[in-house]
Amino acid sequence: MTKNTQSNGADVSVGFEGDFIRLSIDSILPIRSFPAAVRISRKFKQIAASVREVGLVEPPVIARSPGQPGSFLLLDGHLRIEVLKDLGILEVDCLVSTDDEAFTYNKRISRLSPVQEHRMIVKAIERGVSEDKIAKALDILPQSVRRKTKMLDGISDEVASILKDKQCPTGVFEILRKMKILRQIETAELLVNANNYSIAYASAILAGTPQAQLVDSSKPKLLKRMTPEAMARMEGELARLQESFTSIQDSYGQDHLKLTVIKGYVAKLLGNARIVRYFMQNRPDFMAEFQTIAEMTSTLPP
C-alpha cells in the first residue's frame, strides 16, 4: 500500500513500500559511477570496517525501473554496495522507494557531529561493547575511541548543547577545556556566529582570552611566536569583536525585516510601466540596481 488517508480526506503519499526486498546485487543498477580514488578514501574504509564488524546498518534505497519489470535503480547506498561486492556478498535487503527521482538521500541527511558521535560511543560502551570493537567498526585506533569518549570532560552542558549538531573537531573541545565555563560559552557562540569550527580559530580565541578566564589562571599561556604585548592586543581585539557580534545580533532581525519590505516595495515599483520607462530614459543606472534588488533571493552576501 502506498497511500494513507487523513481524517480530512486528503491523500498522503508514502515514500517507501511496506516491505524490504532481497535482491541480487548484480541486478541493481547504480545511477552514478565512482572514480578509483574513492576506494582509498577515508569514508570508504570506514564504511567497509563498519560492514565487516557489525553488518549493514542502513539498507540501500532502490526504485523500480519504469517499463522494465525486475529491474531496479540504486538511489542511495552506492558505497555500501561496492563494499558488499568487495566482501563477496551476493544479495542484499533493500528499501524500495516509491519516488523514482534520481536524487541522493545523503543530501537530506545531517552527518553525525562529533558530539553526537561521542554520545553514541559512550552509550555503546555502557551497553558492554568493547573499545576495540568500536575502533574496528569506525576504522580508528583504540586510543582515538578513548579520546572521543572523554571529549566532553570539563565541557559545560550548555556548550555541548550549542555545538551538538556542529562539525566541530575533537581538538576544539580540548582547547575549550582550558577555559572557565562562561568563557567556554562565549567561545562556542563565537564559533557558531563566525561559522568557523577550526582548531586554528579556537586557538586564536584562546590566545585572546584573559588569564583570569582560564581554568589554570596561574599558568601563563605559552604560544609560539607570541609576545605578551601581542597577546594583550589580541585580547583587546577579541573583546571588541565580541561586542560587534552582540551588536549585530541585536539589530539583525530588524534590519532583515526592513530589507525584505524594501525589496517588496522595489519589486512593486518595477511592476509599473510608467516608472520603468522613466528610469530607463533618465536614470538607467538606478534601473539596473533596482532590478538586482527585486530579483534577490537572499539578503545574505553571496
Image: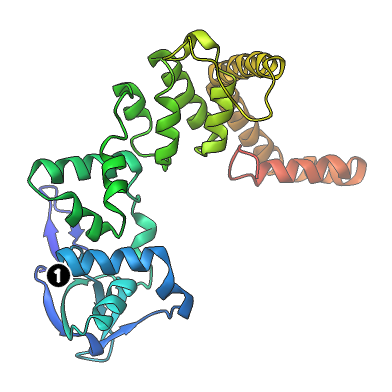
Q: Quadrant of the C terminus?
A: top right
User: Would you say 92 lies left or right of 28 here?
Assistant: left
Where 73 sits versus 27, above or below?
above
Amino acid on which the number 1 mark rests in the picture: Glu
Q: Residue at x 50, y 7 (%)?
A: 212
User: Would you say 46 lies left or right of 272 here?
Assistant: left
> Front-most of 49 and 273?
49
Kindly tell me whether residue 240 is visible in this rendering: yes
Residue that badge 1 annotates: 17
Instruction: Locate residue 34: give its quadrant.
Output: bottom left
Where 191 sits versus 221, above or below?
below
Q: Quadrant of the N terminus?
A: bottom left
Where 91 sits versus 147, above or below?
below
Residue farthest right in this picture: 282
Q: Residue at x 10, y 40 (%)?
A: 126
Residue 264: image x %, image y %? 61, 35
Q: Mark 1 packing: few (<14 Cα in 10 Å), some, or many (20+)?
A: some
> Front-most of 146 and 6?
146
> Front-most of 243 and 256?
243
> Front-most of 167 and 228?
228
User: Would you say 273 lies left or right of 43 here?
Assistant: right
Kindly tell me whether residue 56 is visible in this rendering: no
Q: Secondary structure at mark 1?
A: loop
Instruction: Locate residue 3: give its quadrant.
Output: bottom left
